[in-house]
């Protein structure tokens, strides 16, 4: 990366492993600003959207403040963005949990649905099938990443590089890249050296954007 530590914002909307995400970004070389305020985050070089739990609950929390419009406009401007776990899922068109469909932010086209795997949640370490030309996963071949979820996306978003993962015979999206707008179903902040390398790759993407 070029000189200095890029300023990266982490959106605090009441969901996600905020402190572990902030620590991992700091270790990867970022200056981190954790805030719920778009005004405070607007001057950041990149934006991270974390998330844990249920799709609908995360969307409700985002909709309770300016989060949805802020993330949507950030991505529409092709500014560096990284969604993590449910923060990845809410970037898609919709989420279907137990027959209840909730609208997502709509950055990527696709539906989040329950995995067909017999063993749920998908929890633990798994290898990712890297998309050809992926900058997010550059230098990462058979390394494993940490997953914990029961829902995912099974179709590749149009106009994006898509990396895949398989669990118990079910194949679904592991990571998405459209320019500097990226997201991962897995938790890079919990994925050891592989996750640290991925965060470093994203910071390099952010600096070049």
Image (tube, grey):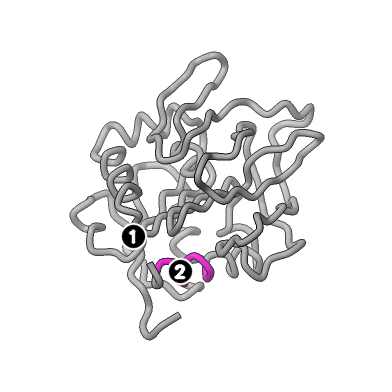
Task: Count neighbours of disc 1 (C-alpha within 10 A) and say few if under 14, some if 14 to 19, many if 20 or more.
Answer: many
What residue sits 40% from the left and 25% below the top? 103
**Numbered range of the magenta stretch:** 200-206
Closer to viewer: mark 2 or mark 1: 2
**Real-space CA distance between mark 2 and mark 1, rounded to the nearest whole angstrom:** 12 Å
Above or below: residue 151 compared with residue 21: above
Specify the farthest residue to the front.
159
Q: Left or right? Give the position of 137 relative to 127.
A: left
Q: Left or right? Give the position of 104 relative to 153.
A: left
- Residue 48 image label: none
SS at circle 1: strand
- Residue 9 image label: 1
Coordinates of residue 21 in the picture (x, y in percent)? 48, 58
Above or below: residue 73 compared with residue 43: above
Q: Is residue 148 magenta?
A: no
- Residue 203 image label: 2
Specify the farthest residue to the bottom.
3
Specify the farthest residue to the left.
39
Q: Earlier in the sequence, mark 2 or mark 1?
A: 1
What residue sits 52% from the left and 71% below the top? 200
What residue sits 43% from the left and 22% below the top? 102
Q: Left or right? Give the position of 195 relative to 46.
A: right
Q: Quadrant of residue 193?
A: bottom right
Question: Which of 144 and 32 lies nearest the eye of the viewer?
Answer: 144
């Amino acid at each position: 990366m070029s000189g200095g530590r890029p300023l990266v914002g982490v959106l605090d909307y009441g969901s996600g492993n905020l402190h572990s995400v902030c620590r991992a970004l700091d270790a990867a070389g970022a200056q981190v600003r954790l805030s719920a305020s778009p005004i405070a985050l607007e001057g950041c070089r990149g934006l991270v959207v974390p998330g844990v739990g249920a799709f609908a609950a995360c969307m409700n929390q985002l909709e309770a403040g300016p989060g949805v419009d802020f993330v949507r406009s950030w991505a529409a401007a092709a500014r560096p963005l990284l969604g993590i776990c449910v923060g990845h899922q809410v970037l898609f068109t919709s989420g279907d949990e137990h027959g209840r469909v909730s609208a997502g932010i709509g950055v990527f086209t696709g539906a989040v649905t329950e995995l067909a795997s017999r063993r749920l949640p998908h929890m633990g370490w798994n290898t990712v099938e890297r998309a050809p030309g992926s900058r997010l996963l550059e230098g990462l071949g058979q390394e494993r990443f940490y997953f914990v979820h029961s829902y995912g996306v099974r179709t590749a978003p149009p106009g994006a590089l898509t990396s895949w993962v398989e669990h118990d015979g079910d194949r679904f999206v592991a990571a998405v890249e459209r320019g500097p707008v990226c997201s991962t179903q897995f938790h890079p902040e919990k994925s050891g050296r592989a996750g640290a390398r991925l965060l470093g790759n994203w910071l390099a993407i952010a600096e070049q954007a």
